[in-house]
Image (spheres, grey):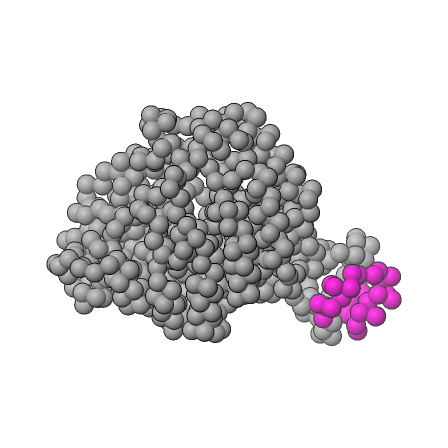
Amino acid sequence: MKVLIIDGYVDEPAHFGVPPYLSTYPRYVAGLARIAGYEVGYKTIEQIRHSEVPNADVLVVIGGVTVPGNYMGGIPMTIREAQEIAEKSNSKLKVLIGSMAEYSVSRAGGVIARPSTFERYNVKMWRGYELKMYKLFTGVDWKKKRYELVKRASILGASIVKEHPNFPDLICELELGMGCEREVHCSFCTEPLWGKFVSRPVEDAIEEVESLYNSGVRHFRLGRVSNIFAYMGGKSPQPEALKELYMGIREVAPELKTLHTDNANPGYMYSHIKAVEEMVGIIAKYNTPGDILSMGVESFDPEVIKANNLKINEKHFLEVVQMVNSVGAVRIEGVPKILPGINLLYGLTGERRATYRINEKALMRILESELMIRRVNIRKAMVFPQTPLFEVFGGKTPRIDEKLYQHHKYVLRKRFDHPMLKRVFPQGTILRDVIIEKHSGNLSYGRQMGTYPILIGIPKILPLRAHINCVVVDHGQRSLTALPIPIDLNTEPLKLLKWIPGIGKSTLSKIEFERPYKNMEDFTKRTNSELPKWIKEMMLFSQKRL
């Protein structure tokens, strides 16, 4: 019996699976199938778009976006694609897993989710799918707790990573818990639909990391949890459990390259600020640089906060940002260990024109305070049934002034993001292990592995999937310009060298006709130019011109 898994990618509030991320869904499903003794195959939606649907006894399709986003590593499966896959497949049993199994919704924000109707799938499931899939594969009920089944499935399914076209350049989401620890939830969020907050045992997460590591994975994110500071504690933080987790991961994956996290509740952080400060210190000690605590602020407008039961006001949030900066802003080769990230959401109850001004002013006060924010995510609400926001809107689409929204984004990208990016990634910052993902004109674009990795533009065509080290030389609104290091002044094209601070048009003309140079002293003397000290240390002077 063969099971074919088609990964259509997922994007949920606490769960990401768009390449280079690999969600828990296909790994768990693979493990569940192997428990039953089935042969397992794995394909991504990108592969299926360029080929036929392979034959299999059981087809399992995974997909669903409940949080709108912009994607570079891959495009999540559409509703039409999910339907076409089922139509083209000759499998006797066709299963659809993920939010798409319940809701038909586009990838854009500012929309209402509708119940899905995929008639060609025999079975559709989302929440609690592990127990249902186990019974589907084995014919019997799982009698024990869910996490005991997840433990077996996650270990047996780990090796499926080798079939991903991006392997080994994958970052695996690791489940730490489900649900939300709050008693009254934010009006829009789907995470409470998973039930009461529950934490996965520390040793189970560590064992899964070990299995993935042994399968060749070197990049990990402690995602799949709505608030990492509530892990193993719920209402009361448990720093020792978090320390045990991070230490255990480092022990079983000694040569990992990425260890990041994701979601954090800023209201919870403020309410337990001393314990959380200790926990941020633990994370900063054991993680890798460039980590982000993604905080769902959603709005700084007091009226919107109250109407939607949001987590924190501006004054308290500023204290949380100050605390995270004081502990996590230590730099490794210029890159901070861990910084706050902010999520802003529009289309909520009580929103008004003043909301945009309030949010803008709050961010500008953070900028003026000389604190660091790694990134601001601005998006429109997606409204799902069974959430309070759906009931308030009566199933109607939220009203958003599109011109005001777009202008607001433009202003924040220009006035906040650009100067903040210069603060977080100053000139001379070294970015290690950047993976080239696409070309555009004479530029190569790449990213590091990690939580919300910054887009890096490189003025040179480099091989796709190449791994390079580079140095930051300039800043956009949401991206960086960087040069591969070391930089060979005698061989690199002029269109790349012009980005070096201190090299102007007249110097470029001299370089074009005078190369090669013997060394930096020779270069300085003959061009009469002085380069910054940090860039001098990254120069090469090969004596053979290409």
Asked if 292 appears above or below 303 in the picture, the reply is below
Query: In the shown orientation, is residue 486 left or right of residue 446?
Result: right
Name the residue rendered at 74%, 68% in the picture. Answer: 537
Q: Nearer the viewer, residue 446 or 243?
A: 243
Residue 494, given in percent of the width and then of the height, sits at: 71, 58
Can residue 344 be spotted in the picture?
Answer: no
Residue 108 at x, y = what percent? 42, 37
Chain part drawn in magenta:
514-540
Q: Quadrant location of the N terminus? A: bottom left
Who is closer to the viewer here, 303 or 10? 303
Quadrant housing residue 111:
top left
Q: Position of residue 413 (x, y in %)?
A: 61, 40
* Quarter of the figure that contains the C terminus: bottom right
Instruction: In this rendered view, identify the residue nearer to me: 93 or 208.
Output: 208
Is 362 in the magenta? no
Q: Residue, x 34% and y 35% (percent of image)? A: 387
Indicate yes or no whether the magenta region holds residue 520.
yes
Query: What residue is rendered at 21% in x and 50% in y?
Result: 95
In the picture provided, is 424 more to the left or to the right than 398? right
Does 186 appear above or below 268?
Answer: above
Q: Quadrant of residue 23?
A: bottom left
Identify which residue is drawn at 56% across, 43% down.
317
Query: Residue 98: where, in percent of width, then height?
Result: 30, 48
Res. 536 in view: yes
**Left or right of 227 in this view: 358:** right
Q: Determine the residue located farthest toward the left in the rendered image.
A: 139
Could you tell me how many numbered marks the image carries?
Answer: 0
Q: Quadrant of residue 147?
A: bottom left
Q: Is residue 298 left or right of residue 53?
A: right
